[in-house]
Structure formats: structure tokens, C-alpha cells
Image (tube, helix red, strand yellow):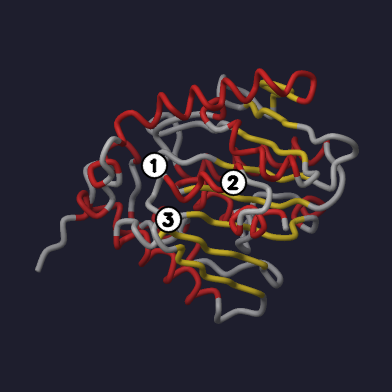
């Protein structure tokens, strides 16, 4: 039986009211920024191009380290401005939180996005000392997991500071995307789909990785989470899989706003 891969990845079509979510995210992020005052630095440059920028949210007092949150949107949508409010859980626990934008398809390939994310993390790490923790949602989960693959774009000093990576509803095997309509925009070919799939890559060193997904998500995202955990359990390191009851692709990240939420603890606990 031929599988409908476009349907497999159609998150918004299966969550009632999801068409209103982008406006709600933007409003929540804008309202949160107003309350931050001097603790918020906006549009810090990490490279060339209008999207090569990141925002930085500072905690009260000295930062325990750097936490980076990378947004989703199938590598085709959104930017750093939609997600500032998701920094609150980590910020309240004493971490500086960087929220980068990155170039999107069709203007950039996924390989170029991977390199851009490496540059963004290095630029943020140059401003904040201490350990580095990475989290990403959906396409962002793919990008943060790529940072701990053997062919990471990160320079060794920054790579060695990474304590933990959290992939939330991440995409780890990109080969099915070759069969979707969105690939007309992503422009993946079989070689790049394989090379950019974290589940098909070896990690560097001994990774500390959490793979988190909502139990009410599309079955493909649960499969992607299980696959990532299964593949990297074959290497030395620590890999944790969490399938959170009741959460869908969009509600699963809301817990990052809460300092004591299990998801926040997985991120910076």
C-alpha cells in the first residue's frame, strides 16, 4: 500500500484551530519581550544575510550557561520573533537563552541551514560562558541534533561545551520527505536527505540526547522519535526517549515556559 507522505506530515490539518496559532505565538512572544527590558538583546548578527541573527534573553544575575532554542516550520517558515516567550523556563532557571533565525528554503539548502546553525551557536557561545544546551522543535529538532553528529559544523571548543541536546518532535530521517510536495521547496535529493539525517549519522563522542514527542502527534513524528533513539542507542552515550501523553505537535513545546516542567528540566535541568 502506498503511503500518503503529505498527510503524514500535515500537523496543522489535524489540530483544530491551528490556523490561529502563528498569530497567537507572535503576540505571546511580543508581550514577553516588553517585560524583559534590558534583559533582552535583539537581532545580534552571526553572519551575512537578513536572517543571520539571533536574540538573546539574559537571566537575573550571572548566567549558568547558554541555552539555545531553534524553531521549527519545516525549514520554510517562521523566525526568532515568534518564540521569545519559550525562553522563560530556562531563563528563570538561570540560563541565558539564544533564539536564532536561519536561512529558509528555497533560498537555502538543508546543508546550508546546518552550517548556519553552527555559526549561530558559535556566535552566541562567544558571548556567554559556561556549558551549552540545545533544544529544537520539529525542523529545529533536526538542526540541533545535527550539531552533535560526527560531521558537526561546530568548532571543537564550542562542540566540547555541549552538555545536552533536546530534540522536540524532531525530524531525524529525511528520506520520506523526498516523496512529499514540500520537497519542491526543500529541494532535497537522495544524497542530501541521507547526509542530513541525524538518525543515519554517527554521533561525535558520547552524546547526551533526549528525544521528546507528544503522544497525540501524527504517527510519523512518533516514529521519527523512536527511530532516532533506537539508532543512537547503538553508540556509547546517553539517549532518552519521552512520549508525553496528551500533547500534540504544538502544545508539546508550551511547557518550555514553565521553570519546573519536565520538558524544561530535560532542556536545562
Q: Position of residue 118 (x, y in %)?
A: 65, 44
Alpha carbon of mark 3 to alpha carbon of mark 2: how far?
Answer: 19 Å
Seen in the image, is 26 located left or right of residue 129? Answer: left
In which image quadrant can residue 202 be found?
bottom right
Question: Residue at the location (42% across, 55% down)?
Answer: 171
Question: Residue at the location (65% across, 22% down)?
Answer: 33
Looking at marks 3 and 1 on the same chain, the residue that comes earlier in the sequence is marked by 1
- Can you identify the residue that label 3 sits on? 171
Quadrant of the drawing holding the C terminus:
bottom right
Alpha carbon of mark 3 to alpha carbon of mark 1: how far?
Answer: 9 Å
Q: Secondary structure at mark 2?
A: helix
Mark 1 crowdedness (10 Å alpha carbons): few <14, some 14-19, many ≥20: some
In which image quadrant can residue 119 be found?
top right
Mark 3 crowdedness (10 Å alpha carbons): few <14, some 14-19, many ≥20: many
Alpha carbon of mark 2 to alpha carbon of mark 1: how far?
Answer: 20 Å
Q: Secondary structure at mark 3?
A: loop
Seen in the image, is 147 located left or right of residue 133? Answer: left
Q: Decide: marks 2, 1 in contact (CB < 8 A)?
A: no
Above-or-below relation of 205 to 236 = above
Pick the residue in front: 76 or 260.
260
Seen in the image, is 176 located left or right of residue 126? Answer: left
Looking at marks 2 and 1 on the same chain, the residue that comes earlier in the sequence is marked by 1
Q: Position of residue 231 (x, y in %)?
A: 49, 75
Pick the residue in front: 87 or 165.
87
- Can you identify the residue that label 2 sits on? 256
Pick the residue in front: 35 or 95.
35
Looking at marks 3 and 2 on the same chain, the residue that comes earlier in the sequence is marked by 3
Above-or-below relation of 31 to 233 = above
Q: Position of residue 234 (x, y in %)?
A: 55, 81
Amino acid at each position: 500500500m502506498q503511503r500518503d507522505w503529505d498527510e503524514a506530515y500535515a500537523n496543522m490539518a489535524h489540530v483544530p484551530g491551528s490556523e490561529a496559532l502563528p498569530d497567537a505565538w507572535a503576540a505571546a512572544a511580543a508581550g514577553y519581550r516588553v517585560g524583559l527590558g534590558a534583559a533582552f538583546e535583539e537581532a545580534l548578527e552571526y553572519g551575512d544575510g537578513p536572517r543571520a541573527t539571533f536574540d538573546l534573553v539574559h537571566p537575573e544575575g550571572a548566567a549558568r550557561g547558554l541555552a539555545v532554542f531553534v524553531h521549527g516550520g519545516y525549514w520554510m517558515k517562521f523566525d526568532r520573533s515568534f518564540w521569545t516567550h519559550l525562553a522563560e523556563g530556562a531563563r528563570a532557571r538561570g540560563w541565558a537563552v539564544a533564539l536564532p533565525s536561519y536561512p529558509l528554503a528555497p533560498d537555502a539548502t538543508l546543508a546550508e541551514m546546518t552550517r548556519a546553525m553552527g555559526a549561530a551557536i558559535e556566535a552566541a557561545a562567544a558571548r556567554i560562558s559556561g556549558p551549552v544546551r540545545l533544544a529544537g522543535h520539529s525542523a529545529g529538532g533536526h538542526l540541533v541534533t545535527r550539531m552533535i553528529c560526527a560531521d558537526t559544523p561546530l568548532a571543537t571548543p564550542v562542540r566540547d561545551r555541549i552538555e545536552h541536546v533536546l530534540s522536540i518532535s524532531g525530524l531525524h530521517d529525511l528520506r520520506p520527505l523526498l516523496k512529499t510536495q514540500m520537497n519542491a521547496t526543500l529541494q532535497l535529493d537522495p544524497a542530501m536527505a541521507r547526509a542530513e539525517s541525524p538518525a543515519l549519522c554517527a554521533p561525535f563522542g558520547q552524546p547526551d540526547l533526549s528525544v521528546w514527542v507528544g503522544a497525540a502527534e501524527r504517527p510519523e513524528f512518533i516514529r521519527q522519535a523512536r527511530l532516532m533513539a533506537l539508532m543512537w542507542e547503538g553508540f556509547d552515550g546517553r539517549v532518552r526517549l519521552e512520549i508525553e501523553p496528551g500533547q500534540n505537535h504544538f502544545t508539546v513545546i508550551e511547557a518550555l515556559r514553565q521553570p519546573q516542567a519536565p520538558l524544561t528540566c530535560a532542556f536545562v535541568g
